Image: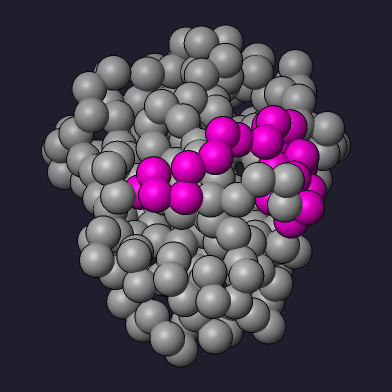
Amino acid sequence: MKKLLFFDVDGTLYNSQKELPDSAKKALLKARENGHEVAIATGRAPFMIRELLEELEIDTYITFNGQYVVHKGEVIYTDQIAKTELQKIIAFGESQNHPFVFLNEKEMIASKEKHLSIEESLDTLHYPYPKIDANYYLQNPVYQTLLFAEQHEQEQYEKEFPNVQLIRWHKFSCDILPRAGSKSRGIQKLIEHLDVSMEDVIAFGDGLNDVEMLSAVGLGVAMGNGHEKAKAAASIITKHVDEDGLAFAMKQLNLI
């Protein structure tokens, strides 16, 4: 049976050095050669994975944790937090001296300049400090907003804004998503478009933003380096990403 394969990027395709291991690249290309469809499911923006998409010749992807879905180069689904709701969140953040970064398919824009939390968080993605425009979200589509606050501060937002969810990806930062937003919902929109069953989907991931995806698909694979909640949601757990865990799992599953 041919499968639809979804791969998270950071900690799954990319190793600890934010590099694509040769073993992972060969495994994806072999899986496609064997007739499986290969897609990306990431919290990153499309422009942040452009080189990866080109290297692997992938034109189907779910980005912003499910808020921007593309099939064969065509946008088939998008979602955003309502601007009125986002405006309230931004105002609350400003009162707490917390900065934000706004993202769409083309760019990321920060609300404040030279903020250490933004700099340190984006450094882990190997991404430079963005341009500044505190009102960017008012005039442009924003598919994901990054809040720069620590875990105990995040809880204040969760109480204040029950219509959104906050998914932590760094000590100093979390993603702000629509309440129903997830990679799982993005996959659901795509398989409806393709008329494919969720049972024919295999997903690979490691983070908190992969939990819903790993539990919803036919078979979820958590990386050995994954968060404990991701491992608990998965059907199987493979080796660490730095130990060629992706290729190992794909061999075990007879995809390659």
Q: Which residue is drawn at 21% across and 40% down?
A: 77
Q: Quadrant of residue 5?
A: top left
Query: Which quarter of the rendered picture does the C terminus lie within?
Result: top right
Q: Height in image: 244 above or below 233?
A: above
Residue 95 is at least partly visible in this image: yes
Asked if residue 143 lies left or right of residue 130, the reply is: left
Residue 58: x and y, percent? 44, 18
Asked if residue 98 lies left or right of residue 240, the reply is: left
Residue 37: x and y, percent? 38, 24
Query: Which quarter of the rendered picture does the N terminus lie within?
Result: top left
Q: Residue at x 55, y 28 (%)?
A: 48
> Outermost residue toward the bottom?
159
Asked if residue 239 lies left or right of residue 70, the reply is: right
Q: Which residue is drawn at 82% across and 39% down?
A: 16
Tell me, what colour scheme is on the image?
Answer: one colour
Please name whichever residue, 249 or 91, is drawn nearer the observer in this view of the structure: 91
Marker count (numbered): 0
Residue 39 is at least partly visible in this image: no
Magenta-drawn segment:
116-137
Q: Assess whether residue 8 is covered by the magenta stretch.
A: no
Residue 219: x and y, percent? 46, 52
Q: Height in image: 244 above or below 211?
A: above
Residue 10: x and y, percent? 66, 40
Q: Quadrant of residue 149?
A: bottom right
Q: Height in image: 228 above or below 157?
A: above
Q: Residue at x 50, y 37 (%)?
A: 108
